[in-house]
Amino acid sequence: MSTRVLIADDSETILLLLRTRLEMEGYEVVTAADGVEVIEAIQRASEPPEILLLDAMMPRKSGIDALRELRAAGVDTPVLIVSAHQDEMDAGAATDVEVSGYITKPIDFDQLFARIAELTG
Amino acid sequence: MLTGLAVVGVARFLQQRQDFEDSTARSYQVEIAARTRLANGEHPAAARTVILTQQHERERLRDDIGGETRDTALLVGAGLIAGLTGAALLFSGLIASMRRPLEELVEASGRLAAGDLNTRVKIGGLSETASLGTAFNEMATELQRRAGERDQLETMKDEFVLTASHELRSPLTSVQGFAELLMLERDKLSSKQADTVEIILDNTRHLVRLLNDLLDLARSDAGRLTLKPSPTDVASLVEDPVRTMLSQTQAKDQALTQAIATGLPPVNVDRDRIRQVLVNLLTNAHEYCAAGASIHVTASGNAGGVELAVSDNGPGMAVDQLDHIFERFTRGDAGLTQHVGGTGLGLAISKSLVELHGGAISVQSVEGQGSTFRVWLPALTGSGAEEPRSGDLDRAQAQSREEAL
């Protein structure tokens, strides 16, 4: 049984890149285009993802805002926030939401796979 | 008022003098009349008495007028002195009423020059000082307006760079990511195709470095470059970047050595940021020096702090180049830079970072013999450790916009 990863990013190209690399590593991938779709995908899923990979800044609902709602609803899935730069990480760190870690763009995939493996045990 | 007293005194004196002369004249008339009667032989005894009486009377009048003159002179003198004192008081009051606004203007100019653009003066005093005050206030208002406009432009520029670097990052992530994806299937590519993808990747990494550097500078300018300092052991601070660089220097057959003095005090630094500075200095040495060159890193105690130095026996720099080496987009000799992957921003960022730590960076170089870059950092002193600081030292006014993005 492969590990399910939910990825959210407003760029289709980035989603394609992430999906391709993650599937090559043997992960099962669910995608979302923004925070609203992230929450819908988790509510709809018969088997919830084991890790979330959320872009910090997305239209409609940001990764941080979606995460805040999920945590309030009792969802404790590990989350990696993908952020464009340090300022977003600082902004995320300033919130009270529990985050498992940050991945910066451009993505270092070796580092990303290591973090996912570590968090999904 | 007091001068009035002198005037009154003089008037009184003149009046008394007039009275004296009138009385004296009357006395002479009476005496002359008595002497005429005496000469005519009319009542000689009575006439003699009158003459004597009048002589006595005039003596009395003279005595009186003498005393009166003294009194009047005293009165006039007192009046004059009082008048002069009054005039002096009035004058000094006038000077004070001019001096106070002037002193306030001088003091306000000082504050304005020191950067307090909220400085205004109270308008008062003579009309000249009042109009000087009005002009000063108008000037301060104009300065404040222009400074506000400039700050607004600076903020817009900083925001633009921050936003641009954010927006550029997504497409760069895709370019780099897909190029890497291609390289994962390198065995399916022709060697020419593989070389092409390698070039795409090299340039993408360069773009990412440039973007990171621009972002650091924009943050520094906006006063948003924040440090997370902690007490740090100097040996590990130096060893880590040296270890990182070893594979690259070995590939170019360069000798990278280090000498760390024992017993150095710890420093209160943001480890990642000082690492960034040292990696930048080591990368410069590595890239500008020819194959086979020597790069030597030292750490020693100096002037209440720690000095980290990166020396090389590479091409060195000319004096006119040294003056601008810490400025943005300044790089070594153009003939060399075509082989060098730097962004031209590394030393400018290093300078910002070191100064943000309360330290200093300097360079010494002899053309054809080599260069030495020195980074001085203050030692961690007991409880008086440096507070974590935010902002660029060059722009103290940036402190008003420290909000996070």
Image: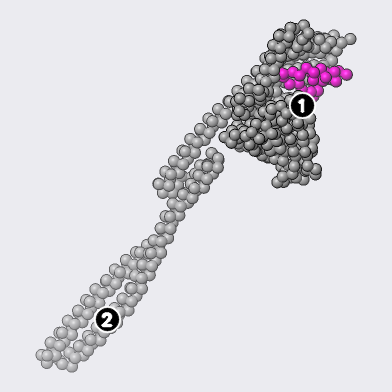
Relative to B152, is B199 on the left or the right? right
Residue B15, compared with residue B198, is above or below; it is below
Earlier in the chain: of badge 1 and badge 2, it is 2
Which of the numbered marks, if any, corresponds to residue B214? Answer: none
Q: Residues within 10 Å of mark 1 (few under 14, many from 20)?
A: some
To which residue does mark 1 refer? B250
Residue for point 13% across, 88% down: B37
Q: Nearer the viewer, residue B262 or A101?
A: B262
Which amino acid, mark 2? Answer: Leu
Residue for point 85% across, 20% down: A118
Residue for point 75% across, 12% down: B183
Residue for point 58% across, 25% down: B156
Q: Tell me where the magenta segment starts and ends, as one range.
A: A95-121
To which residue does mark 2 refer? B61
Q: Is residue B211 magenta?
A: no
Describe the element under mark 1 as helix, strand or loop: helix
Question: Within the image, what quadrant is residue B335 found in?
Answer: top right
Residue B110, compared with residue B273, is above or below; it is below
Is residue A84 among what the camera can see?
A: yes
Horizontal and vertical percent position of residue B223: 64, 32
Q: CA distance from mark 1 to mark 2?
A: 128 Å
Which amino acid, mark 1? Answer: Gln
Describe the element under mark 2 as helix, strand or loop: helix
Horizontal and vertical percent position of residue B316: 64, 33
Relative to B127, is A103 on the left or the right? right
Horizontal and vertical percent position of residue B170: 68, 16
Is residue A19 among what the camera can see?
A: no
